Image (cartoon, rainbow, N blue to C red):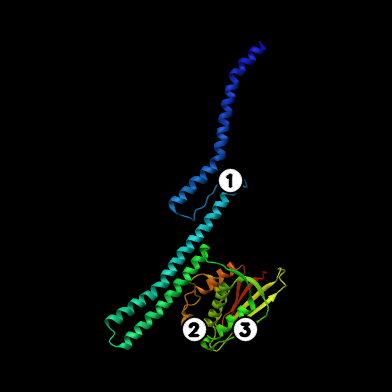
Amino acid sequence: NILYNTVRLSFWLLPLLALLAILGGYAITRRSFLPVEQIARAAEEIGESGDLSRRLDIGQGKDELHRLVDAFNGMFDRLEKSFEAERQFTSDASHELRTPTAVIMAQAEYGLELADSEEEYREALEVIKRQSERMNDLINRLLFFTRLDQGTEPVNMEELDLSSLTADICAEQQMINCNDITLSADIEEGIMTVTDRNLYARLLNNLCSNAYKYGKPHGTIKVSLKKSDSDGVDGGVAILSVADDGIGISRENLEKIWSRFYQVEPSRSEETGGGGIGLGLSMVKQIATLLGGEISVESTPGEGTVFTFRLKLKK
């Protein structure tokens, strides 16, 4: 009897227990995968709306799913910043190209319809030539930035004498003598490293060009290259500085100067005869990163600015 009742009870209980186990397992599994469903739905909504400011939210936690959500949100942060920078870059580039294009069109119309003498034709052509050169410079810089962003800009690392290269660049810059500004160089000899010759030259030329542009008339530019062993870096660090005694930069604008097309004061170009397009320092920042160095700036309004590039020496 006992055995019979046990078997009979088991006959009814086992299917019931199996059913309860299945239902319980389904409920637990469903609940476990609910955050995954939320992630998928939110990702689809972000993709359909194109709103990269939205973020995934499944509450607090430290398990694998929450780490995955944090990774997704970090990716959305980077994408949002990248797309916003791209939109701003496109807008700024269009704005910069609009002015020389308008001037060229106006001068071409003037030359064709209103110019009555060879001198007037020549003046119109000279204006067109200057604006065309400005557009060509802008386009070349934009192409350079694009190659850097896409990683297609060739980087030719070679062992070279940084002291000799810096001295040669300074000698070339001294011939510019813009606004009667005097450039002096204090270069420690024999500093050797492995770096890209052309990129380093572009970095230093841009820093010197910036110093000439915003330096004080009849002022000075001081270029210094020293080797430092105090940073605890094997091989030491080369410290390049370019200092001017010009108009300087206010504290609130120091970080903004690295942005593309940013100019602290548009009127400065008129004051100094620069007419810059706000790409030089952004290029310096990107080259410094590409070469594995660091660029920094210190400035006092009315007294001058010092740019410092630190590069680990490698052999």
Q: Residue at x 49, y 84 (%)?
A: 272
Question: Can residue 150 be seen?
Answer: yes
Tag 3: Cα neighbours inside 10 Å, few (<14), some, or many (≥20)? some
Where does residue 33 sit, x and y in percent of width and height? 55, 40
Q: CA distance from mark 2 to mark 1?
A: 57 Å
Which of the two discs, 2 and 1, labels the residue nearer the N terminus?
1
Q: Position of residue 229 (x, y in %)?
A: 72, 73
Count of number-bearing discs: 3
Marks 3 and 2, the one that precedes in the sequence: 3
**For residue 87, side relative to residue 225 (left or right):** left
**What residue is shown at x 48% (from left), y 62% (from top)?**
84
Q: Disc 2 residue type?
A: Thr
- The local secondary structure at tag 3 comes to strand
Q: Observer-nearest residue: 235 or 230?
A: 235
- Disc 3 from disc 1: Cα separation: 58 Å
Q: Are marks 3 and 2 in contact (CB under 8 Å)?
A: no
Residue 249 shows up from this direction? no
Residue at (41, 80) in percent of width and height: 130
Query: Which disc number belongs to residue 28?
Result: none
Q: Which residue is mark 2?
A: 272
Task: Residue at the far top: name it.
Answer: 1
Position above or below: 10 against 86 = above
List x then y, in percent, for residue 201: 57, 75
Occupied quadrant, residue 224: bottom right
Front-lying residue, 260 or 27: 260
Q: In the rendered image, which residue does mark 3 sit on?
A: 185
Q: Nearer the viewer, mark 3 or mark 1?
A: 3
| Tag of residue 65 | 1
Distance of label 3 from label 2 (alpha carbons): 23 Å
